[in-house]
Every structure is written in C-alpha cells, then in structure tokens.
Image (cartoon, rainbow, N blue to C red):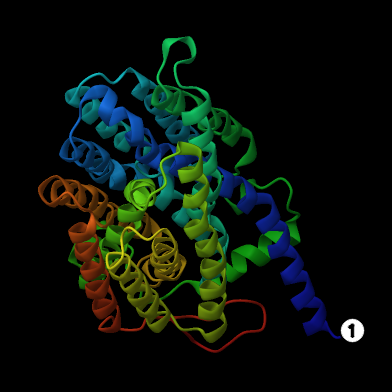
Amino acid sequence: MNSLTAQSQFESATYAKVTWRLLPFLFICYVAAYLDRVNVGFAKLQMLSDLKFSESVYGLGAGIFFIGYFIFEVPSNILLHRVGARVWISRIMVTWALVSAASLFVTSPAMFYTLRFLLGVAEAGFFPGIVLYLTYWYPSSRRGRMNALFMIGIPVAGVIGGPLSGWIMQAFNGVHGLSNWQWLFLLEAIPSLVLGIATLFMLPNGIRAAKWLDDREKQLLEDNIARDENPGADHSLKAVVSNGRVWRLAAIYFCCMMGLYGVSFYLPTLIKAAGVKDALNVGLLTAIPYACAIVSMILVARSSDRRNERRWHLALAAILAAAGFYASTLQAGNLLVALITLSLGTAGVLSMMPVFWTYPSSVLSGTAAAAGIAMINSIGNLAGFVSPSIIGWMKDVTHSTNAGLVVVAGALVVGALLTLTQRAAVSPASGASSSAPRRA
C-alpha cells in the first residue's frame, strides 16, 4: 500500500469517526427543535375551537415566533462563536423546552403571541449555530453531505412527529382535565430538555477539545480546515452588512423558507381538508411527504458534492417545490393528488437546504461567518412569519388555502431565478490529495 493510499484511508477513517460522534447527536437535537417549533400545526386542529381563535390569529401566532428569532439570531451566533458551542447550545435547548411546555397555559391571543415570540427568542441561534459548528470540523468539499445529514432532522421530525402528535392528540384528550393540545406541548418539550442537559457532556467546542481524537487525527482535521480557508473571504462584521452576496443569499433563503413553513404549519390542515378527519390518520399521512423528502435531500446533496455544483441543484429543487405546491391547489379535495403534489413540494423545498448552506462559508469566515450565517438565516426565517400569516389571512378571506399556496409557489420561483443569477463561489481544495477548485 503506497503512502497516498494509506493517507487517504486514514483521512476517510478520521472523518467517519467525527461524523459518527457528532452527527447522530446533532441530528436528534434538531428533530427535537423542529418538533417544538412546528407542533403548533397539530395543536391547531383542536386549539382553535377550544380557544375560539380565528385562522388569522393562528397564522400570526405561528409566525410571530420568527420575529423573536430574527431579533436575537445574530447576537446568539456571535456568542456561540465566543463562548463555545457546548454551553450555548445547551442553554438554547433548555430554554426553548421550558417555553414550549409553557404553551399549554395559553388562554388568549395575547398569551399565544407572547409565548410564540419568546420561543423564537429562546431558539434563536440553534440552527445557524450548528451550521457554523460544522464548519469547524468539515472542509467545504464535505459540507453538502454533512449539512444534509443534519438537516434531514426536519423531514424526520415530520415522519416521527406526525404520527406521534396525532397519537397524543387522540390518546390524551381530557386526561387530568387537560386538552389534547395542552398535552402535546407538554410531552413534546421533554426530549428537548433532556437533550439540552446532555449537550453539556456530548458536544466538544472544537477539534482540540475532542478527547476521542488523537493528536494525528486532530492535526489532519485542522490542516484541512486551514487549507480550505478562502483567502478572499471576508472576516469583519462590517463585511457582513456591506456584502451584496450575503443579502442575495438572504433573499434566496427567504424564498426557500416561504415554502418550508407553508408546509410545516399547514400540512396537517391540508391533509384534513382532503377528507381525513381522524387526528391519528392525519398524523400518519403527514409522514409521507416528509419521508419522500428524506430520500431527496440525501440524493440531491450527494449529487451536488459529487459534481461540485450548487446553483442548478438549488434552482431545480426550488422549481420542483413550486410545481408541487401549485399543483396541490388544482384538486385540493382529492387525497391521493394532495399526497403526491405535497410530497413533491416538500421534497423540493427541503432538498434546497443542505445545498444552500454550502454557500455562506465561501463568502465569509471567522466572526463574520458566525454573524453572516446568522443574518442570512434570520432574514430568511422571517418568511416563517410571512408565510403562515398570508395563508391564514387568505383562508379567512377565501375559505381556502389555495391562494396562499399559489403565493408560496411564486416565492419559490423567484428564489430559483435569484439562484441562477448568483455568481458561483470558488473555494480552495480540501482533503489530503485534492487540488482542483470546487464550484459552489
């Protein structure tokens, strides 16, 4: 065996070791995070009638989460970069678990809005913090796949959370005097609380803090990160707000999130509108679009990494999502058509995410990367306020979700067009034996 082959095998084994130690735990944390963020979509099935809330009240409450998220996202990510991921991610998870559980006490629109806002404040920094954290370990050539392994937490939360939420709604209604939606908020907060405490023991702050790596493995990882550093990347905080590419990326991500949160907050409603009334059956059927998305996310991310190409993968995924959401409005009462079209839309919009998040680190680095990733994510996630608010308002006016879904499809088309006008980023090579530049 020659030295290059031995080095390549050592590198592959080292990254496999890192991946098995970090990704399963981060993935489980993201499943818990996303479940607590969007379980209000299931609570809605009973909560609105119990509390006499309108669709507009629900849409505003579901979306106001993202106002708190927006305000505190950048400061949270900068603090994570400075104090370390272990303590800060733990703080985020414990805080949001407590706020999410407190949602069982909602009795008025004002309380609903307040707790949703505080949940956004509590969770701010988690997702961009993990995206940033992965850049501490993996060079750009590996980030598409690693992002996908982490971000499939979203569809897995749908696959697991749909049936789980439906079962809780069916089995716990009236137990100890609490409604099913109150039990939903309480029980689904427990995993986040446990994982938040576990983070203090499971998550090293970086390569040097990983006791399960030897010195040679640590040196390899650090050398690859150093070699991958883009000499043209901006480091300063000022560079974040003055960089036009960052603002364009934020606009693209906003369009992506219009689709994601249209699905996240309204998929149970859309399935119910297609003729499914039982809460458990609604939960089981919502798992189908998310299961399709798990497969598509992994395949698209692998294809993007293998071909060293990002723009067309991102744009075509957006077009697929737009086509699926628009087609779902054509025969909204047909369950089979709804499942097929919503599966296409969900698969498309979720496949955008791991490919998209390979971009920011090619533009920014250091503290600017922490702030830039957070800024892109926070601006993009304002769509989480806009999307459910528009759909809820349009449903009150038209008594149908179709008009809102058309708006969501239009936003995704705009995102595809913005992506195709985005200049390809060029990153330095990474890995022990690679020397060719890679197209982002």
Q: Quadrant of residue 342?
A: bottom left
Q: Is residue 274 visible?
A: yes
- Left/right of residue 65 with respect to residue 39 in the rendered view: left
Please name the amino acid that badge 1 sits on: Met
Q: How many marks?
A: 1
Residue name at image x 40 percent, y 27 percent:
181
Q: Badge 1: how crowded within 10 Å, few (<14), some, or many (20+)?
A: few
Which residue is farthest right?
1
Q: Residue 149 at what x, y percent from top left? A: 57, 60
Q: Measured along the vertical axis of the image, is residue 340 above or below residue 400?
A: below
Q: Measured along the vertical axis of the image, is residue 129 above or below residue 51?
A: below
Residue name at image x 49 percent, y 36 percent:
165
Image quarter where the C terminus lies is bottom left
Q: Residue at label 1?
A: 1
Q: Is residue 374 visible?
A: no
Residue name at image x 42 percent, y 49 percent:
127
Q: Residue 60 at what x, y percent from top left? A: 19, 40
439 or 370, which lies in front? 439
Q: Residue 371 at what x, y percent from top left? A: 31, 54
Q: Quadrant of residue 225?
A: bottom right
Which SS class for mark 1? loop
Image quarter where the N terminus lies is bottom right
Residue name at image x 57 percent, y 82 percent:
306
Q: Measured along the vertical axis of the image, is residue 351 above or below residue 192?
A: below
153 or 333, which lies in front? 333
169 or 147, which lies in front? 169
